[in-house]
Amino acid sequence: MTGQQKSGAVSSANVESEIRANVAFEHLVAAIVSGAALAAAMFFVLDFAGLVFAGALSAPNLLALVLKSLTLCIMVFLIGFLAGALIVTRMFKALEKAKRRSVWPYLAAAIGVTGFSLIMLFSLPNAGAPEMALIIAIIAAGLFIAFDFGRRMTPLWRAVERAEEQAVGNVRHLH
């Protein structure tokens, strides 16, 4: 191979790696949007039930609940997007190089980000103690995002594995 052919092969592998990382990030963002919506819905339902059982259901309380649910949705999305850009994309590239394609590393990352987010939430000054509904919604969203990302990526991971197996089958050994 000439130097130009080698650089072409290297850049081709680099381009494939970047394309895979971009596709993974797109699937992650879709999972984050779904997880943020799930967190908001869970929080709304749990807090709404609390208002009903406490006999405190009123228009101002309902409006406050809607606004808190929307705020939670935005917060989960922003935290997930930031974690995806800073952590998951780099982790994906490293795991792809190692040919480790499963949901478990991403679940561990989601648990870490969720735990860190809850710790930061507890340490905010003058914020008060977070409600149980908020904690449940954040934990459920983190787990959902990881599993949904894995569900979305599984067909792609299998396709890459099949393509790699076919490429290996086409290699001719000279010795």
Image (cartoon, rainbow, N blue to C red):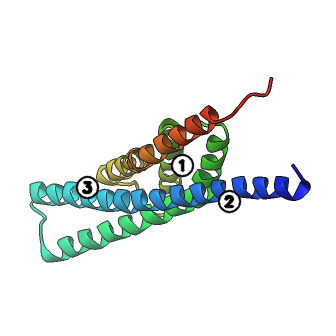
**Residue lying furthest top:** 175
**Comparing marks 2 and 3, which lies closer to the viewer?**
2
Residue closest to the eye, 174 or 143:
174
> Percent x, y for residue 30?
41, 61
Of the numbered discs in the image, which one, if any, rests on residue 42? 3
Q: Is residue 140 left or right of residue 109?
A: left
Mark 2 and mark 3 lie on one chain; the one further toward the N terminus is 2
User: In the figure, 69 relative to 63: above or below?
Assistant: above
Q: CA distance from mark 2 to mark 3?
A: 40 Å
Of the numbered discs in the image, which one, if any, rests on residue 16? none
Mark 3 belongs to which amino acid? Met
Q: CA distance from mark 1 to mark 3?
A: 20 Å
Residue closest to the eye, 167 or 35:
167
> Percent x, y for residue 118?
47, 50
Residues at circles 1 and 3 in contact by the CB criterion of under 8 Å = no
Mark 2 belongs to which amino acid? Val
Q: CA distance from mark 1 to mark 2?
A: 33 Å
> Percent x, y for residue 117?
50, 53
Residue closest to the eye, 145 or 131:
145
Residue where numbered disc 1 is placed: 116
> For mark 1, does the 10 Å Cα neighbourhood hold few (<14), some (14 to 19), or many (20 or more) residues?
few
Judged from the image, the secondary structure of the residue bearing numbered disc 2 is: helix
Judged from the image, the secondary structure of the residue bearing numbered disc 1 is: helix
Q: Residue at x 58, y 55 (%)?
A: 20
Mark 1 belongs to which amino acid? Phe
Q: Residue at x 62, y 41 (%)?
A: 95
Question: Quarter-wise, where is residue 42 in the image?
Answer: bottom left
Residue where numbered disc 2 is placed: 15
Q: Is residue 126 left or right of residue 97?
A: left
> For mark 2, does the 10 Å Cα neighbourhood hold few (<14), some (14 to 19), or many (20 or more) residues?
few
User: In the figure, 165 relative to 123: above or below?
Assistant: above
User: In the figure, 125 relative to 63: above or below?
Assistant: above
